[in-house]
Amino acid sequence: MDDQPTRTRIVIERKKSKLPPHMGRIKNNPTKYRISCFLGTLFALTQAAFGRMMVSMEQSRTLEDLVRSIASCGRQHIIIKGSPDPDALASAWALALVGEGIGVSWLMYIEQPLSLSQNRALVRALGLRLHSIEAVKKMARKGDGYSIVDHPDSTVGSIPDWLPCVVHIDHHTPVAGLPPARFRSIDPDSGATATIIGACIFSGGMALKEEKRRLLASALLAGILTDTDHMRLAGQNDRRVMGLLSQYADDRLVRRISLPAMSAEILHEQEEAERHAVVYKGWMISGIGYIESSTRDTIAIVADRLLDTHREVEAVVVFAGIEDSSRGTLVLDASMRCRDADLDLERIIKSITHHGGARKHKGAFQIPLEFLRYCSDRKQLWSVLEDATVHALMMACDKHGKKGILATILAPLRRFFGRWKK
Ligand SMILES: [Mn+2]
């Protein structure tokens, strides 16, 4: 099957090149010049209209397209690249069910181990068997394909080169240069990937057994609730899809799998974060030391809570050294939260590292520290990591923050042009 067109942006190029010789001649003839201008405008308008049509076609992708893409592979390898949170798990299972409905079997893989009790509860409730990402190499056969949910980057390093990407669905800020996918839907206006998939499946009227439908609606709803901070950040799409899902979902199950368990550990980490926080130009930056990868999501919850508690700051960054003792890995993981949707977290993160991404209000980056895990003085290593991270963030704040250099230079210009707009 042909590759589906990727999400297109309408770009009308304005070239500053000199007029070609024949245009020079036309310019000397006013009537011909006017006709050529008119034809040029007509051509540009047609192009723009066609582009817009392509975009709206993309947005109205139906269940049929999704089914066709999954049907094109013998077996679906569904990969969760980011944190296996309720949004990613529910979305991945939704793709599995779409495949199951047409006889395409599936396997599910995770790059990071499960963290937090509600994620484990969701995996149990759905009866999911999760494999480690390294297993794809062994399991993939010719004719299979892989799917990515809830991650802006559809490339996966540890899979065979010949394995095609059949589905890529996400709600983070899109990244450039992705490999082709047979079905791709990237919508940063949706608060969760579960919103995009939920709309596709539940307004598309996919046939599902009652029990599976109840479970899927509950899981997707929990995914949307978790990613939108219990609707605080929900947009129009999210609310519409939540309305659809709530007709089938089981309230008690949704509560169980979407409420962050308020453990003593989280409260302790929050206190730690407050004690070590550096406040710089409205940003609260805090490193909480080393934590085990099974409790990795703590930093995201602590970041949420700090932004909630400290109303005076515009952004919060909580970071930690994440250790996985079974794999022997060490990763610097940071969670960013901001109050104002205008603060471009994607740009801020990309100014620090390419290992991360963001959407409105939330972002994260992970820097692998492969070699540094051999450092025997862990205390000293942490103080180096803390120093480097805090300084990198301060520089990013200077450049892109609301009280940073760019904002200070641009503010009078904005005010000046704002006056003219009125
Ligand atoms: Mn998500």
Image (cartoon, rainbow, N blue to C red):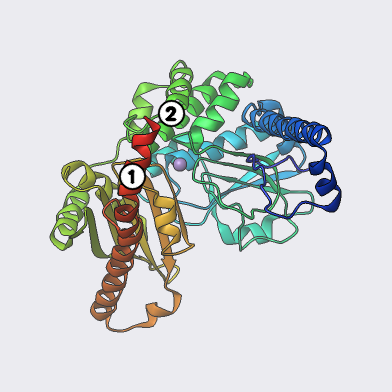
Residue at image location 81% in from the left, 43% down from the top: 28
Kindly report which numbered mark, 1 or 2, lies closer to the viewer in this rendering: 2
Viewer-proximal residue among 253 and 385: 385
Name the residue type under label 1: Ser
Residue at image location 57% in from the left, 34% down from the top: 94
**In the picture provided, is 164 more to the left or to the right than 110?**
right
Is residue 102 something one can see in this rendering? Answer: no
Residue at which label 2 appears? 221
Q: Position of residue 95 (x, y in %)?
A: 60, 36
- Name the quarter showing ligand 1: top left
Quadrant position of residue 34: top right
**In the picture provided, is 66 more to the left or to the right than 214?**
right
In three-dimensional space, the C-alpha distance between marks 1 and 2, rounded to whole angstroms, equals 17 Å
Viewer-proximal residue among 350 and 120: 350
- Answer above or below: position of 317 versus 195: below
Element marked by disc 2: helix
Name the residue type under label 2: Leu
